[in-house]
Image (tube, rainbow, N blue to C red):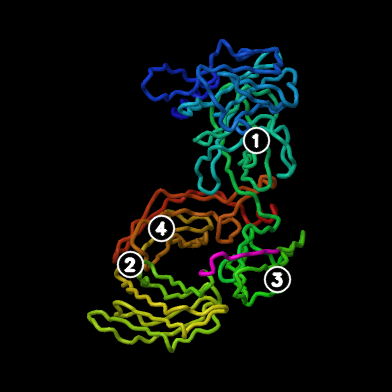
Amino acid sequence: MARFNYIIWGILSLLLVACGQVGSITGGEKDITAPGIIQERVNPPMGSINTSPQEITIPFDEFIEFNKPAENIRVTPADVKLDYTINKKSVVLAVKTGEWKPNTTYTVYLNRAVKDITEANDSIIAYVFSTGNFLDSLKTAVQVQDAYSGKPVSGVTVGLFTQKLINDTSKVEPRYYASTNEEGIAFFQYIKDTTFFIYAFEDDNLNNRLDATEKRAILNRLVELDTVFETVPTIRLMAPEANELNIISNEVIPTSTWCLSFNRPLSEEENFSFIAPQPAHVIWNKTKDSLSAFYESSSNSGSFSGVLQSSEKSDTIIKKYFIKDKKELVLKISNNLSKNQLWANDTLKLKANEPFVYFDQAPIVFEAIKIKDTVKSSLDFEVINHSSIEKHIYFDKKNIEKVFISIPPAAVQGQNYALNDSINFNFSVQKEKETGVMIVEFDTIPEYGVLVISNKAAKYEKRVVFDGVEKTDHRIEYMQPGEYSFHYIYDLNRDGKWTTGSIFNDVEAEVIEWFSSKSTIRANWEVKTTLPIKVVKMPTDEEIEVEE
């Protein structure tokens, strides 16, 4: 709290003196100070009352230039828009549109909009005046945290609105606004005593209002105004609800594969259908929010089309393509080996960039060197079709040191292309004793949710569901050595993943608890990790039904 108070009063002091640091020129050392305001020459003077200036002049003690002025020069309340110019060492602001309202305190923010020419230093500057007999003195502040990571978010626009927002297309602008600092805190001062609602949003297009695609947050109560800062409420910035179905990526990759992804999974009432030419194969992902359509075509150019059908609309999607590098138009086969090693509990998987027409295992050479042996010997194997583009190969991994595989062109034919040459690769088989065992438990029964266990270095993630009734621990075998981290999703809708909320329907994004505890797995070791779970109040089934 002491550190927070220090930050608050430091920023208040910064604003009250217009934030210019004045440094002396030594002739040889690097200039590390920001341009300083010459206070006695500011016109009208800082803190003026009974004034409605059509032009404001702010002189500096060195030559300056602008830094994104359209983005960084702001007026609160936003009753006017200002033109901005530099005249020698001064910033000149002139009213472009709108007019100053009577008996109102205004703050003009130069939010790192001014820097010196040589070293590009900048600072936050606030110029305050009133059109009435006094300066409004009320203040407030709020901290914005990312709803998923729980970390403070800087550079977010926070607005004080005089009315509640009905939707994110209402084009209502805030009466006051500010940007969050590196600690995610937005400060407001010189506020008039009235009723405000507070919203935060990532103003991507800099139009000073909430748009449908922007992350957002809400304070679910009226803003508290005071003459001093005491406690600062926290609001959670979350992605917008994906209500209307839209395509978010649309590309064609070699060979003749049309890849589409959507902003959310398709419902039972929604559909994507293809217009001639029809693809030979279509593969949807598990969550049904993306697909790959494979076409019979050896051409490097053309077009594909389809219809996205939802309850609100029906859109025809056309994708033209041209593949410049014809060397990409070949059958390619990849595998799931990690550094030429097949993990102890894994199956060898071969995946092609287009569907297989046939896969004949007879010509394939499949050999192995067994433990304590030096000579290759033939190894029996079985090929199982996992999908039109993926084959799983099973063999007895017991006592195997190394495996050698050679797939000749005669063994494989793709939908459009054959292999140009044989595919040869070899790999070792990981032993069970080279892996570890993880036992993770909670210190109490958590609410229903999903524990996410991840190892970024190994690109590994496992999700474990806890029933919220009796399950407190879980055992995982064949863990790869390394450091693992944990977070817990309070999975309110029980869909197995984190879900955002709605600022218009008073629905919070699902809570995530991030644990500082790490678990280090070593080969042939069993490691137990206990996680302290917080008690989070979750709605009952009856409450969920009422909300719906």
> SS of the residue at dot 4?
strand
Q: How crowded is mark 2: few (under 14 residues within 10 Å), some or many (20 or more)?
A: many
Assess whether residue 31 is covered by the magenta stretch.
Answer: no
Q: Which of these two is toward me, 356 or 239? A: 356
Task: Judge whether 254 appears above or below 243 on screen.
Answer: below
77 vs 473, nearest the viewer: 77
Q: Distance between the residues labelled 3 and 2?
A: 46 Å
Sequence order check: which comes first, mark 3 or mark 1? 1
Query: Pointer 2 and pointer 4: residues touching (CB < 8 Å)?
Result: no
Q: Is mark 3 on a helix, strand or loop?
A: strand
Spatial distance from mark 2 to mark 4, Cα to Cα?
14 Å
Q: Earlier in the sequence, mark 2 or mark 4?
A: 2
Mark 1–mark 4 Cα distance, whole angstroms, equals: 38 Å
**Total marks in image:** 4
Q: Of callouts 3 and 2, which one flags the residue occurring earlier in the amino acid sequence? A: 3
Q: Earlier in the sequence, mark 1 or mark 2?
A: 1
- Of tags 3 and 2, the one toward the viewer is 3
Q: Which amino acid does label 2 sit on?
A: Thr
Given the image, on which type of amino acid does mark 4 rest? Asn
Where is residue 448? Give x, y as percent.
Answer: 54, 58
Q: Cα distance, mark 3 to mark 1?
A: 45 Å
Above-or-below relation of 534 to 223: below
Numbered badge on residue 341: none
Determine which of the numbered discs, if any, sits on residue 274 in the image: 3
Residue at the disc numbered 4: 455
Report, in whole angstroms, how far the alpha carbon at label 1 lies from the one at label 2: 51 Å
- 441 vs 5: above or below: below
As shown in the figure, which amino acid type bears the numbered disc 3? Phe
Quadrant hosting residue 308: bottom right
Q: Residues within 10 Å of mark 3 (few under 14, many from 20)?
A: some
Q: What stretch is highlighted in magenta?
A: 318-327
- Residue 198 shows which numbered tag? 1
